Image: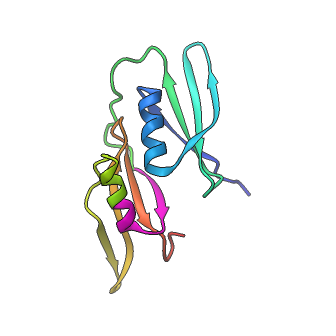
C-alpha cells in the first residue's frame, strides 16, 4: 500500500507563507532544505503525519498564475464556528461558513480561506466522512 505524505505548493515569499500557515493551521517547519536556486520547507502539526511542502523558487519575483486547474487543500477542525471567528480575528479573511446538503442531511460544513499566494484552502467541520 502507498501512504500519502505531502502536498506541494509554490510560494513567492517564504516568511509570509510560514506566518499564514502557522496562524491558520498551527503548521510549523519540520524540515527546511535550501538549495542554490530553490528552497523546500516542510510543514506539519501534531494532528497528522501529512505535510505541506512549500517550494520557494529563489529567482521568482512575480506571483504564480494559479490557472483554472488547481483545486484546494482541506483541513478538518473540531469547531468550525470557533475557527471561523479565530481566522477573522487573525485577519485571515475567511469566507462564509456554508453547509453542503446531501440526501436530506449535511454532508459538510465548511469555509474557504486563501493563503498569501491565492491558493484556496477548505476548512471543514470534523464529522461524518471528514474525521
Q: How many marks?
A: 0
Q: Is residue 61 above or below residue 104?
A: above
Q: Return the residue nearer the eye: 23 or 124.
A: 23
The residue lying at 37 percent from left, 41 percent from top is 115
Q: Is residue 128 above or below residue 44?
A: below
The residue lying at 42 percent from left, 64 percent from top is 124
The residue lying at 25 percent from left, 61 percent from top is 96
The residue lying at 42 percent from left, 26 percent from top is 13
Quadrant placement of the C terminus: bottom right
Residue 81 lies, in percent from the top left, at: 35, 67
- From the viewer's perspective, tell me whether residue 74 is left or right of residue 101: right
The magenta segment is: 72-84
Q: Which picture quadrant has residue 37?
A: top right
Residue lying farthest front?
89
Q: Which picture quadrant has residue 74?
A: bottom left
Residue 7 lies, in percent from the top left, at: 55, 44
Residue lying farthest left?
96
Q: Is residue 38 above or below residue 48?
A: above
Residue 111 lies, in percent from the top left, at: 33, 60
The stretch drawn in magenta includes residue 83: yes
The stretch drawn in magenta includes residue 23: no
Q: Return the residue nearer the eye: 5 or 21.
A: 21
Residue lying farthest right?
1
Q: Is residue 20 above or below residue 36?
A: below
- From the viewer's perspective, tell me whether residue 35 is left or right of residue 92: right
Q: Which picture quadrant has residue 62?
A: top left
According to the image, what is the colour scheme of the structure?
Answer: rainbow
Residue 44 lies, in percent from the top left, at: 60, 46
Quadrant placement of the N terminus: bottom right
Amino acid at each position: 500500500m502507498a501512504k500519502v505524505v505531502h502536498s506541494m505548493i509554490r510560494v513567492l515569499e517564504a516568511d509570509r507563507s510560514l506566518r499564514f500557515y502557522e496562524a491558520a493551521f498551527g503548521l510549523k517547519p519540520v524540515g527546511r532544505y535550501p538549495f542554490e536556486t530553490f528552497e523546500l520547507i516542510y510543514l506539519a502539526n501534531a494532528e497528522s503525519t501529512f505535510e505541506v511542502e512549500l517550494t520557494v523558487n529563489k529567482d521568482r519575483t512575480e506571483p504564480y498564475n494559479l490557472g483554472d486547474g488547481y483545486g484546494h487543500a482541506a483541513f478538518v477542525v473540531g469547531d468550525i464556528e470557533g475557527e471561523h471567528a479565530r481566522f477573522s480575528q487573525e485577519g485571515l479573511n475567511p469566507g462564509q461558513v456554508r453547509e453542503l446538503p446531501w440526501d436530506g442531511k449535511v454532508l459538510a460544513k465548511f469555509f474557504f480561506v486563501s493563503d498569501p499566494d491565492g491558493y484556496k484552502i477548505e476548512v471543514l467541520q470534523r464529522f461524518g466522512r471528514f474525521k
